[in-house]
Amino acid sequence: MDFDDQLDRYFGTTDVAAIHPEALAADAERMRVDFGLETNPGRRFALWALMYMLGVAPDLDVAFKDAGERDLARDFMDMVDRAEER
C-alpha cells in the first residue's frame, strides 16, 4: 500500500494539509475498523503507519500481538521522530 493511495482512499486527497479535522475524526474510526479486520500483515502495518503519522494509531501492545511486529513499529516510530527533528 502506497501512502498516497491510503490518503486518497480515506480522505479523497493526497494532501495531508487539506484534510479537514472533522474528516480526520470520522475517517480515523474507519481506519481503526479496517485495521482490525485486515489480515495481511503488510497492509495492516501500512495502515497502522498511516494512523501513527496522523496521530490516531492504537497503542503498540493493542495493535500488534507479535513482539517482532511491535519492534518493527517501534523502529518506524523512531525513524519518523528523527525525521521530524530535522
Image: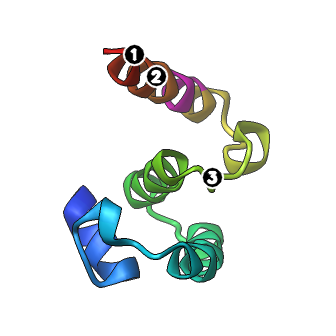
Amino acid residing under circle 3: Ala
- Location of residue 27 (image quadrant): bottom right
Q: Are marks 1 and 2 in contact (CB under 8 Å)?
A: yes
- Measured from the top left, where is residue 54 in percent x and y? 50, 53
Q: Residue at x 52, y 56 (%)?
A: 51
Q: Residue at x 65, y 69 (%)?
A: 36
In the rendered image of this protein, does residue 31 appear above or below residue 68?
below
In the image, taking residue 78 as reference, residue 15 lies left or right, namely left
Q: Are marks 3 and 2 in contact (CB under 8 Å)?
A: no
Tell me the quarter of the image containing the N terminus. bottom left
Q: Which residue is mark 3?
A: 57
In the image, taking residue 21 as reference, residue 1 lies left or right, namely left
What range of the chain is rendered magenta?
71-75
**Which secondary structure type mostly characterizes the magenta part of the structure?**
helix
Q: Nearer the viewer, mark 1 or mark 3?
A: 1
Q: Nearer the viewer, mark 3 or mark 2?
A: 2
The span from disc 1 to disc 3 (Cα, nearest Å) is 20 Å
- Measured from the top left, where is residue 22 in percent x and y? 58, 80
- Location of residue 33 (image quadrant): bottom right
Q: Which mark is residue 81?
A: 2
The span from disc 1 to disc 2 (Cα, nearest Å) is 6 Å
Q: Which residue is mark 1?
A: 85
Amino acid residing under circle 2: Asp
Of labels 3 and 2, earlier in sequence is 3
In the rendered image of this protein, does residue 17 appear above or below residue 25?
above
Q: Residues within 10 Å of mark 3 (few under 14, many from 20)?
A: some
Amino acid residing under circle 1: Glu
- Measured from the top left, where is residue 43 in percent x and y? 39, 60
In the image, taking residue 73 as reference, residue 6 lies left or right, namely left
Q: Is residue 46 magenta?
A: no
Q: How is the image coloured?
A: rainbow
Q: Residue at x 29, y 84 (%)?
A: 12
